Image (tube, rainbow, N blue to C red):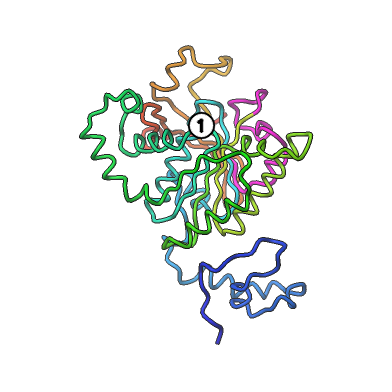
Amino acid sequence: MNDPVDPKAERQDPGEGPSPAFDRKAGVTPADWPSATAETYLPVLRNRHVGEPEATKIIPSAFQFLNNNMGGWRTGLHLLAGEPGSGKTSFALCNAAVAARHGFPVLYLSFDVQAEFLVMKLLCQQGALDCRDVMDGTVDPAALHVAMEAQAKDFSRITVIEADPELPNKTVKEMARELINNSARERALVIVDYMQIWAAGTREFSEFRHEIAKLMTAMRHLALSLDSPVLAISSQNRKHQGESVLQSLEGTSDLEYSADSISFLINVERPASQGSYTHPDDLITKSRSVSINLRKNRFGETGSRMVKFLPSTGAFDEETVRRPYAP
């Protein structure tokens, strides 16, 4: 009889050979690895997909559209792109909150925004508070207290790091692994906000596209070694900014090949000929329709879904807008 398998046993990185957990499940040794056949993986599939409650396996998305099309945030590298003001960080935060609500640890790496500001945005989003009121100190203290009390448990599962662009990928893996080991789940949601800043941290190549390609490999490696999803926010190049096209991803064309899913947030209420909103304050005050365009999906169908984005709180409403958006 095979020894019991620790579900949180260290998963080695690709290229390092089979992990001890895999050996015990499959009944093979490192010496057998070069000649392993597809049959070798059958016990692995049985252990992974049979007899485990669904709630403990899949990290759900905050959007039913993505849950329907991808089955939630599955192990792999997921990219989210959009122009400034489209709600990318708010999108990442609401997905962090949903993952935490379902018991999964979240590691949020912020290379662009202070941790305190991110947590404030998250609190406003989940507590339906106006961000401007909180920042101005005019929020009702009782409402703020209620929101803090209501979110304390979920927030305890979300680790927000003001990350240095020189942060090694190995360190991120160690942090995420510790969060998983200290939780009741076998996976974590890792969020990178955002990837172009991280890629610029350690310049090894003269061309930035090579830095992006290196980081993409590292993030995919991270996802597979943790058996967890990595959600990375990406900027768009100026030529295709505001368009849901794969060529708009900033840095290199390799992005579209390395990712398991690629989504775009598109401000559909802005005229195509208009470079920005007539009134910049509209970006932080007026609710507007945004299209979530899933343009690559290794787990199912692609498609689009209109949602309402409320910048004052950073929240999204998927129910008020139901018609599909056709770019």
At 52% across and 54% down in the image, what residue appears? 176
Question: What residue type is disc 1 on?
Answer: Tyr
**Residue 257: image location, x then y, percent:** 70, 45
**Residue 237: image location, x then y, percent:** 66, 27
Q: Is residue 240 magenta?
A: yes
Instruction: Tell me the quarter of the image containing the C terminus.
Output: top right
* Residue placed most toward the observer, 241 or 231: 231
- Residue 81, placed above or below residue 296: above
Give the residue number, with chain letter if any, for mark 1.
325
**Residue 63: image location, x then y, percent:** 44, 43
Q: Quadrant of residue 126?
A: top left
Q: Quadrant of residue 236?
A: top right
At 57% across and 58% down in the image, what residue appears? 226
* Residue placed most toward the observer, 203 or 288: 203
* Residue placed most toward the observer, 141 or 50: 141
At 66% across and 32% down in the image, what residue appears? 250
Magenta span of residues: 237-262
Instruction: Tell me the quarter of the image containing the N terminus.
Output: bottom right
